[in-house]
Image: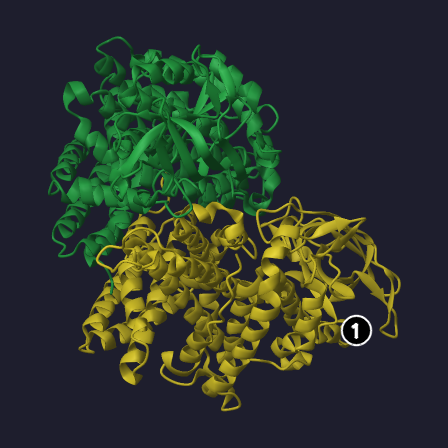
Chain colours: A yellow, B green
Amino acid sequence: MTTPYQPPVEDYAFLYGQAFGLDLLERSTGGALTAGDATDVLAAAGDFAASVLAPLEELGDRQGAQLVDGDVRMPAGFAEAYRAFVEAGWVTAEAPESAGGDGLPAAVRAGLGEIWNASNAAFALCWLLTAGQIHALDAAASDALRETYLTKLVSGQWTGTMNLTEPEAGTDLGAIRTIATPNDDGTWSISGQKIFITWGDHDVAENIVHLVLARTPGAPEGAKGLSLFVAPRILVNEDGSLGGRNAVTTVAIEHKLGIHGSPTCVLAYEGATGYLVGEVGGGLAGMFVMMNSARTGMGFQATGIADRAYQRAAAYAAGRLQGPVLDRPAGTTIAEHPDVRRLLLSMSSDIFAMRAMGVYVGDLFDRAETDGTGTLAEFFVPILKGWATEDAVQITSDAIQVHGGMGFIEETGAAQHYRDSRIMPIYEGTTAIQSNDLVGRKVIRDRGRTAEQLFTLIDETSAALVASGDAVAQRVGERMQRAVSAARRATASLLAVSSQRDAFAVSVPYLMLLGTLAGGWMHALATVAVLSNGGDAARLTAADFYTAHHLPRVHGLAETVAAGEIV
Amino acid sequence: MTTPYQPPVEDYAFLYGQAFGLDLLERSTGGALTAGDATDVLAAAGDFAASVLAPLEELGDRQGAQLVDGDVRMPAGFAEAYRAFVEAGWVTAEAPESAGGDGLPAAVRAGLGEIWNASNAAFALCWLLTAGQIHALDAAASDALRETYLTKLVSGQWTGTMNLTEPEAGTDLGAIRTIATPNDDGTWSISGQKIFITWGDHDVAENIVHLVLARTPGAPEGAKGLSLFVAPRILVNEDGSLGGRNAVTTVAIEHKLGIHGSPTCVLAYEGATGYLVGEVGGGLAGMFVMMNSARTGMGFQATGIADRAYQRAAAYAAGRLQGPVLDRPAGTTIAEHPDVRRLLLSMSSDIFAMRAMGVYVGDLFDRAETDGTGTLAEFFVPILKGWATEDAVQITSDAIQVHGGMGFIEETGAAQHYRDSRIMPIYEGTTAIQSNDLVGRKVIRDRGRTAEQLFTLIDETSAALVASGDAVAQRVGERMQRAVSAARRATASLLAVSSQRDAFAVSVPYLMLLGTLAGGWMHALATVAVLSNGGDAARLTAADFYTAHHLPRVHGLAETVAAGEIV
């Protein structure tokens, strides 16, 4: 059952132009781009996604990527779709200007990220990883590497991967055992096994550039001893033409719960030729550039998968007749059953919060250099990644529930989102990794200053709502005020812990508290905007619902945070 | 990766003999059975489940049931396992004495239900549905039907199914269109299509007895016009021997997200011979007997699937080394990482609450006739079904999270539980159906009297904890006292609603509130028992954890309930 994908262009127009009280793009680009321009970009992307990517999503799931005689064969249509994606200019559009791309602002890339992932998350992962590598090479690669590799990634001719994980080195990168030894000609020889390599092999582009974390001879133990290398699938001649295969082979692809259209590879490096990126021992720093990009990208993926699941559920409910609906005329569909309506509003109001947060965080990054918003942007990365991916999994589960028994049948399509989504709270750093980053580096290290900066911003919005005179806005504002109190109590508890274990044992509840709170703030801001400028009254209903059904969780979470580790 | 199944016999020994302050079995059976006897039964069942059923679980998922030339072929080994299950006497053991079974008390059947479902949920569904039919026929069938059909179900020679759902009649049974017309010989002729028929066809027993809801000629519209019929897969001759095939065919089996080892059939009745059970028009009443049994059974299934997922995660975490663990010596496994420990305690403390509630509700049913506990038992049915199945899905998700990236790989086995579990909040009445039953029939109809009876019981336990002088017990008691206040506020909100929509729009949050609260009470009772009699100190840690991480959700849920429908 294929439900056409509806790109959320109207929501983005509202977010770019009104929700935050001004034209975000105009401000961040100094007038070079407007909200209207950004919306036009998303409308075009939405058309492409709905017509080219969405139709391949279920097929990608059913066929999956296959390993045939050592090479990965992608599902039918993926290669053509990738060529169309490149030819339409979407790769170059998102790449930074410094690397030869069009340099679309991060606030716009938030919308693009959602749209690619909503229409076909397995396909979108290829670009998500390539984009991360572009940022990493742009930050650290030599001119020669930029010329040979970065230009080809930015043009979309080649794709990129991220090679961190090994069988005994997942979260603990310090345990990486892959070795790179120097050759006489300045290149390096890489040997080792990497696992969980997304789009590690495929047949949609002519070459694949692997970005590999490896250990050099005599390097110190742990993460400090890691360096970063580029190792192409096919070697590149001096003149830029393609030569023979590099000594890296695809040993296996994983049989996964979801995202079957994305090949997850085990790669064996057996003396593969590699090129050092940056300095020896600078691997982790280089990789972090890529990881930050990938983590923010996960927030957009979460929004995308969640919205696609929601759209499917909403379409099913709007078309399904089943029994009389309480206080509604005969012929009313199940969408108006009180509990189905609850589920749909729960999903859509949470998705709006994610979407708005993606734009907000993108804008913070866009203004980091001019307005000093970088610290707050960094504060939000683990929140967006952790909270949005956890909530997205729940939303895909709710989408199944709306379908009733049909949701459990694969043909409906709802189950795919539930399967696909489950990897999100794991890859690019589990929720625990995000929450330890948040609590350790971003709350405890600065003694809660950035957190308090956020709370103060929320206070201002809440006060405006309480003073607004509108009944819905008032109760939204009051709920936000009580929620911020809970967040301040939780932050104080964290700052007062006597052992780091007490903090890390409740860091996920703390992250979920801040994510839920910040989601409420997005609704609060939208409410202020609608009250000021007029607009869709449904946005007030969404704010009312979110702050009655999602936001109150903060009260329980604050108690949990205060408890510390239970021993 | 096969993790051996460990039956939770010790927990049941504690629940039967100590947790509730006395020997539950001795009380309910008047001394005919003791907690020790019941524990022995579970130990034997556990051995059988671990050695015969658990080894088929992953194979059942991979092979799945297949439709071949109109007949369902079960995965390899299922037929042999079913014969062994029958020969070991487990079918007869659970059947009521009035139907020729051994009549094990419901409190013991709770443990058996968990064990069968933990070891192999797809397999267990066959018996779960058969057991429901045994109860329905025992309540309403004529002597002739009892002789021909009930005896064969109780002996395990034949299995039973439950035929309610049709393409346009899911939750709304009143829309059923299957027709039964009387034949001259007193039999009926059934025509129509039934969908989602669990174990609707298979090759593990020689015959299948379908219990079918159908409409008779001239019957009133809606649910009142439904009657209940027995229709065997293979017709039965006068002498009890098997004759030819009945006119019921398996048109298709569903391609499902999970429980692949359980065939979910589309059955076409084309003038199939049926036999009336009970009175014309009494179909729904008869089916409710079966549904109540199936709903309670779902609570046990939830506990079982959740516990198997937990066991797998705990075993993985206890064997996995990955990086240094905060404040722990080198060589400590990830099980001691603060967040992995949080996840494992979250799962295990919730599973204990479900398990205890299953025994508690079983005991209430066991004492319904002697001690008047029937109303409270009925009150708990939707709570156990709704809350335990929703939480079980989350637990299977947590089990994936503990595995990290490996959790997303099907070979690990964690993904299967996540897929299998997702049907539980849907079948046998969705969570919304449970919550409307709870709120409409069991709270609003009696003006909250039964709810208040429960709260008063909880008050007593909380007071005992607060007065205990033990620091952990005191804080558990205080948390329970605040939670009961939230529950009383939520109940008062429900009783004060001005429209039924305001109640039904928050009935799921209310159900989850009561389930979470009652789960806390189970821990509170266990804490009292451990303080009085000594015992495993880990039970205090579990109570402390549950009331710090799960119980505080009631505060947010109470706010949500008070909000009513958001319009």
Determine the residue located farthest toward the bottom in the rendered image: A31
Q: Mark 1 points at which residue?
A: A148
Q: Position of residue A404 (x, y in %)?
A: 40, 48
**Residue B488 higher or lower than A143, as above or below:** above
**Residue B86 higher or lower than B440, as above or below:** above
Determine the residue located farthest toward the top in the rendered image: B32
Q: Is residue A438 visible?
A: no
Q: Could you say which is closer to the camera, residue A157 or residue B362?
A: B362
Q: Could you say which is closer to the camera, residue A72 or residue A190?
A: A72
Q: Could you say which is closer to the camera, residue B498 or residue B331?
A: B498
Q: Dot 1: few (<14), some (14–19), or many (≥20) neighbours within 10 Å?
A: some
Q: Residue A319 is drawn in which quadrant?
A: bottom left
Seen at 43% across and 41% down, the residue is B423
Q: Can residue B271 be seen in this view?
A: yes
**Chain for disc number 1:** A
> Going by the image, does B547 lie left or right of A287?
left
Seen at 64% across and 67% down, the residue is A127
Q: Could you say which is closer to the camera, residue A87 or residue B321?
A: A87
Q: Where is residue A355 in the image (x, y as percent from the top left)?
A: 44, 69
Q: What residue type is labelled 1?
A: Thr
> Going by the image, does A234 lie left or right of B108?
right
> Going by the image, does A149 lie left or right of B210?
right
Quarter of the figure that contains the C terminus of chain A: top left
Q: Where is residue B339 in the image (x, y as percent from the top left)?
A: 45, 46
Give the structural element (helix, strand or loop) at label 1.
Answer: helix
Image mark count: 1
Q: Position of residue A516 (x, y in %)?
A: 36, 61
